[in-house]
Amino acid sequence: MYLVNDIIAFLAANLILSQALGTSTLFVAADSRRKLVGTACCITIFTTIGSAAAYFINKLLPSEYKNFTLLLYVLTIGLLYIGLLSAVYFITPERFEKIRKYIHLSAFNCAVIGTLFTMEQKSANDPSLMKLGEYVKFGLEAGLGFITAALILTAAFRKLNSSKVPSSFRGGPAILIYLGIISMAVYSLK
């Protein structure tokens, strides 16, 4: 029973569907399964490690410097971006060209920065969440939520782009309406 509750909470708290974070990257990822796997893995890495870094930023940054939170988040993501690119280059230089496009798509995605700010707000409202484990868990859930949202979108992507859909509605508009309907259904589970 707890597993079912966790899955429902995981879907209901999904940043992608409830706040439309990362929607443009979601469109790119839903185009093919290979792109979906690469992008989803990279976004999960960025949200998880970025959330851990956000914990330390929020904990160590004095209150009079809270205006610099956005700058510190962006710098942190930039450092993660450079670190991940470097790691991939040194670990598998022959696959670097194939993998780097997923890192580029994922690094400065609004789902990543949105995850950091959402967790900051949640921990400000509930001080019991101001723990490293909670931040990492939330980052991992956000990344897995992105994967779930991408899978949901992939299921309908080809049909929403087919010739059966009116040309003025095909593509982006149909996908956004579809995401809105899915997000309302997921939000009702909350």
Image: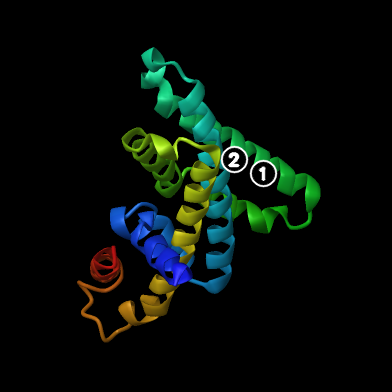
Q: Is residue 86 above or below residue 14?
A: above
Is 128 left or right of 173, judged from the image as shown? right
Kindly identify the residue that appears in the image at 53 percent across and 29 percent down.
56
Residue, disc 1: 85
Expressed as whole percent of the image width and height from the top left, the position of residue 6 reads: 44, 64
Helix, strand or loop status at disc 2: helix
Kindly identify the residue that appears in the image at 36 percent across and 78 percent down.
156
Identify residue type, mark 1.
Leu
Expressed as whole percent of the image width and height from the top left, the position of residue 65 reads: 40, 15
Is 104 left or right of 125, judged from the image as shown? right
Helix, strand or loop status at disc 1: helix
Residue, disc 2: 81
Image quarter in which the N terminus is found: bottom left
- Residue 127, numbered label: none
Disc 1: CA contacts within 10 A as few (<14), some (14-19) or many (>=20)? some
Kindly identify the residue that appears in the image at 50 percent across and 48 percent down.
139
Image quarter in which the C terminus is found: bottom left
Expressed as whole percent of the image width and height from the top left, the position of residue 149 reads: 41, 66
Which residue of the protein is positioned furthest toward the bottom in this rendering? 164
Q: Is residue 101 above or below residue 167?
A: above
Depth check, front residue: 172 or 47: 47
Identify residue type, mark 2.
Tyr
Task: Measure the alpha-carbon separation of dots 1 and 2.
Answer: 6 Å
Disc 2: CA contacts within 10 A as few (<14), some (14-19) or many (>=20)? some
Which residue of the protein is positioned furthest toward the top in this rendering? 64
Does the CB distance between marks 1 and 2 fall below 8 Å? yes
